[in-house]
Amino acid sequence: MPNLITVFGATGSQAGSLVEALLEDGSFAVRGVSRCNRSEAAIALQAKGIEMVVADYDEPESLTTAMMGSYGVYAVTGNYLEKFDEEREVLRGRALIQAAIQCGVQHFVFSGLQSVREAIGQPCPEFDGKAKVENMMFKSGLRCTSVRFPVYMENILRDFIPVRQDDASYVWNIPMEGKPLPMICASQAGQALLAVFKKPEHYVGRRVGLAGDYRTMAEYAAIASKHVATLVIKASQITAEDFKKLDLPRATDLGVMFQFYQTAYPEYSVDDTKRLFDQVIDFDEFMSSNAPKLLKLLENNNYSGF
């Protein structure tokens, strides 16, 4: 019987891409973990033959039950609404690590991030919480790997949709001030995560920063414009400091995050990612598949966010 990989957050985009890669590859048995198995996504995974179990990060006993019998575990802490609570994320990470040790997990792979506070002296809860969990994990004695995701390419269709201007152009309000930004197609990155599990001799004890592309926002905007040829998308001229002052949810945290991305500290590599999965797509390839979605969003012109 093949070794079992248990995937937390299996119904999400990041962990869900690993589930799909595991299914396609067939080298491992797969168990998915979610907080509710009655969602459409959970039901769809069960229909594919995935064993789905319910667990709650705030109930340590459920984590042990979910991991029991697993060779490997992929863990994503938090969820979209709660993951920016640094203290809570650290508590959840500790519970996951303790459960993995108790269950004898042989390869624990964590979706981690660097400490922005340590790098540039400013707090960024989303990053700093995961960095603390990373450090805890590597000190625990677990055979483990941290895989760090940058900004998702999918965010152009969700959280960072370009905003219409008075001249009918669209501005992508990501304040990178001319510096390149690492991006990854999250729905495809499962192939890279699969390679981490298949090559433990290379990746246990390591931190791996994924990237499918690494360009300036002007370059990304030009690529997006090419694929929605009737419209023009531009890079924002806003600075990260001015972004922090916007009347938007989490504007300060996001501004700090983009300040961090502007420095030499972020550790993401397209080359390292291609060593894991040589078919990782860049932003041009992403847009060739997703241009109709973006065009529809822009033409609806009902987005007033970033």
Image (spheres, rainbow, N blue to C red):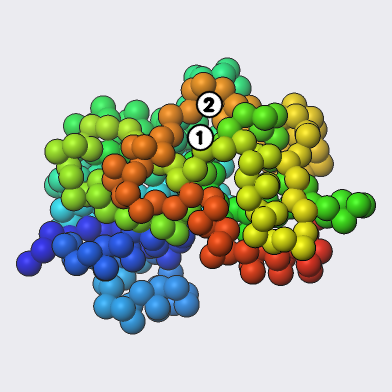
Name the residue: 56% across, 19% down.
120
Residue 179 percent coordinates (x, y): 62, 29
Which of the marked residues, 1 or 2, is nearer the chain's N terminus? 2
Q: Is 160 located above or below residue 146 in the figure?
A: below
Which residue, as the protein is rendered here, is positioned at the far bottom?
47
Residue 226 quadrant: bottom right
Q: CA distance from mark 1 to mark 2?
A: 6 Å
Residue 97 percent coordinates (x, y): 28, 41
Mark 2, Cα crowd under 10 Å, few <14 / some 14-19 / many 20+, is many
Residue 37 quadrant: bottom left
Answer yes or no: do the residues labelled 1 and 2 have beta carbons within 8 Å? yes
Q: Which residue is mark 1?
A: 127
Name the residue: 75% across, 29% down.
239
Name the residue: 40% across, 73% down.
42
Q: How many marks do you count on the picture?
A: 2
Mark 1, Cα crowd under 10 Å, few <14 / some 14-19 / many 20+, is many
Give the side of residue 122 with respect to residue 41, left or right: right
Q: Callout 2, which amino acid?
A: Val
Residue 303 percent coordinates (x, y): 78, 59
Task: State the mark number for residue 116.
Answer: 2
Inspect this view and state whether residue 59 appears: no
Task: State the mark number for residue 138.
Answer: none
Q: Callout 1, which amino acid?
A: Phe
Name the residue: 47% across, 77% down.
40
Q: Is 288 located above or below residue 185 in the figure?
A: below
Residue 130 percent coordinates (x, y): 44, 36
Give the side of residue 15 with respect to residue 83, left or right: left
